Image: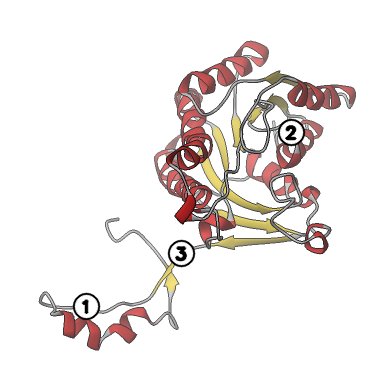
Amino acid sequence: MSGVDGRVIIVTGAGGGLGREYALLLAANGARVVVNDLGGARDGSGSGSEMADKVVAEIREAGGEAVANYDSVATAEGAAAIVATALDAFGAVHGVVSNAGILRDVSYAKMTDAQWDAVIQVHLYGGYNITRALWPHFREQRYGRIVVITSTSGLFGNFGQSNYGAAKMGLVGLINTLSIEGAKYDITANAIAPIAATRMTADIASADLLAKLSTAFVAPVVTQLMTDECTDTGSVLVLGGGLVQRVQLFQNAGVQFEQPPTPAEVADRWAEITDMSAAVPAKNPLH
C-alpha cells in the first residue's frame, strides 16, 4: 500500500470549500473518505445533510468510496459518532483532516462570551475531540495521519478574530505535542494554514486577491501529508495561491543572567534580549 490508496480518512467540515477539495482529491487518489459536515451556516447556526451527501455523491460518481456523517465535532459524543461511521463503513480508520470551522468575527472590545465559546468549541475542542476519539485506534494499529487546519490569524493575528486566532494557535500547540507522543507509533501530526477563496474568506479579502487563491492549490499538500510515505511531523505550513511555505519558531542566543537581575539591568540589555538578527530554530529548553 502506498500514498493514500485504501486508507480510510475522515475529513471534517467536508461539505464545501476546502473540506470538499480535500475529500475529493483524497478519494481520487484511492482513499475511502468519511465526509463529515454538520450542514450549518458559516457562523455555525443550523444543520442539515445536503452538503455532505452532495460531496459523497460526487465521489461515488467519479468511482470513489465515501460515506456521509452529519455529527458535530464540538462534542466528544459527536466525534465518537464520526469515528464510528468510519469503522462501521470501512472497518478501520487511518487518518483525519480536522477542518470543520465557523466564524464569529467581532472586535475584542465587543466580543461576548458566547461568541468566544462557540468558536473555541468548534475549532479547538473540535480538533481535540476528533483526535482524542481516534488516538486509541491509531496507537493500537501503530499508524495514523493527523492534519489540523490552523490559520494565519493565529500565527500572525488579524483584527476581529481573537477567538478564531486563539483557537487556531491552540491547534498548533496540540500537534506539537501529538507529534512527540505519536512518534513511536508512526502517528504524524501536522498543521496547515490555508489561504483560499471560500465562504469563510468571501468578505475578508478583496475580489482581486481571492481570484488568485483557488482551493485547488491547497488539497495536494493535504494529500501528501496523509500518505504513508510522508513521515514529516510537527510541521506548520502556510499555503495559498500556489505558494507553499513552512513556518517555524526561532529564538536568539539570549542573555544569561548569573543572578536575578534588577529591572534596570534587564532594561540595560533589552536590545540584546530582543535582537533576532542571528536567530536559530527554536527548541524546547526542557528537552
Q: Which mark is residue 134?
A: none
Q: Secondary structure at mark 3?
A: loop
Residue at the right extreme, as displayed: 61
Compared across the picture, whether 199 is left or right of 154 comes to: right
* CA–CA distance in space, label 1 to label 2: 50 Å
Q: How dense is the environment of label 1, judged by Cα within 10 Å: few (below 14), some, or many (20 and up)?
A: few
Point out residue 130 in the picture as x, y percentages from the top left corner.
Answer: 52, 29
Q: Amino acid at mark 3?
A: Leu
In which quarter of the view is residue 39 placed? top right
Badge 1 or badge 2: first in the primary sequence: 2
Numbered label attached to residue 23: 2
**N-terminal label among 3 and 1:** 3
- Side of 145 relative to 284 (left or right): right
Image quadrant assignment for residue 96: top right
C-alpha span from label 3 to label 1: 20 Å
Point out the residue furthest to the left here: 259
In the rendered image, residue 156, in percent from the top left (x then y), is placed at: 53, 63
Question: In the rendering, at what x and y percent does residue 207 appear?
Answer: 81, 59
Amino acid on which disc 2 is placed: Ala
- Position in image of residue 222 (x %, y %): 67, 44
Q: Is residue 265 left or right of residue 204?
A: left
Mark 3–mark 2 distance (CA, rounded to whole Å) = 30 Å
Residue tagged 1: 256
Residue bearing the label numbered 3: 249
Q: Is residue 85 left or right of residue 249?
A: right
Q: Residue at x 57, y 36 (%)?
A: 145
For the N terminus, the image quarter is top right
> Farthest residue in the bottom direction?
268
